[in-house]
Image (spheres, rainbow, N blue to C red):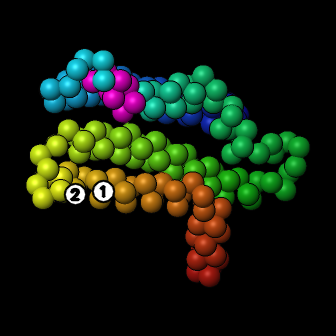
Amino acid sequence: MELKELANLIVKLAGALVVVFSLVAYPNFVAMFYGMDMPPIPAFGYAFISAGIPLLIGLLLWLLPTLVTNRIVLDVKKDPNVTGQLGTEFVKGALIVLGCYLLFRSLSDLSYHLVVMSNKQSVVLGLYAIDAETWGSLAATGIELAIAMTLVLWAPQIVAKIRSFHLKGE
């Protein structure tokens, strides 16, 4: 099995895993939103937003793995000098894929927390009376979103910095 075939297989398996997790999570989201005394149509809609985005990303990874692997795996047969860069490209690609996963997960969590906050409409002195757990979850989602954006936007710089630390150690 060649490197590109192995990379395609790994990306397909990752996509299948994301699809399974999002399908398993969907009933939990429906029950959660439906239990908030929300009409059924918005409850199913919010649940689709929360579980549907990862489902679509997983389907894209499953059906089109070459979109990811063609950017990550370079063709060694065309350019034999590329072999030293393969590890760097894998790490860069892995950071970007991890960042995309965290980005979509945090956007899903953010939409959930905004719905929860909008349903807690007990206004006291013009402020929403939201419990500490919801604020903590919202803060964690914000941190997750910041980490995701950092990984997606600055993966090449992160890999270059890691590489410079390894080169200093040799």
Q: In which image quadrant can residue 136 be found?
A: bottom left
How far apart in space, not on screen, are marks 2 and 1 (Cα)? Answer: 6 Å
Q: Which quadrant holds the C terminus?
A: bottom right
Structural crowding at the residue carrying mark 1, measured as other residues with C-alpha within 10 Å and reported as few (<14), some (14–19) or many (≥20): some
Q: Nearer the viewer, residue 160 or 9?
A: 160
From the top left corner, tell me how far across and down residue 125 is, in percent: 12, 59
Residues in magenta? 43-51
Kindly give the residue lying farthest to the bottom in the view shown.
168
Q: What secondary structure is marked by label 2? A: helix
Q: Nearer the viewer, residue 128 or 135?
A: 128
From the top left corner, tell me how far across and down residue 99 is, in percent: 51, 51
In the drawing, does residue 75 fall left or right of residue 23? right
Q: Is residue 98 above or below residue 70?
A: below
Q: Nearer the viewer, residue 142 or 97?
A: 142
Q: Nearer the viewer, residue 121 or 167?
A: 121
- Res. 136 mark: 2
Q: Does 48 lie within the magenta span?
A: yes
Q: Is residue 146 above or below residue 80?
A: below
In the drawing, does residue 15 fall left or right of residue 144? right
Q: What secondary structure is marked by label 1? A: helix
From the top left corner, tell me how far across and down residue 8 is, in percent: 63, 31
Q: Does 156 lie within the magenta span?
A: no
What is the three-letter code of the residue carrying label 1?
Ala
Residue drawn at 30 percent across, 18 percent down: 41
From the top left corner, tell me how far across and down residue 13 is, in percent: 50, 29
Provide the residue designation for mark 1. Answer: 140
Residue drawn at 85 percent across, 42 percent down: 77
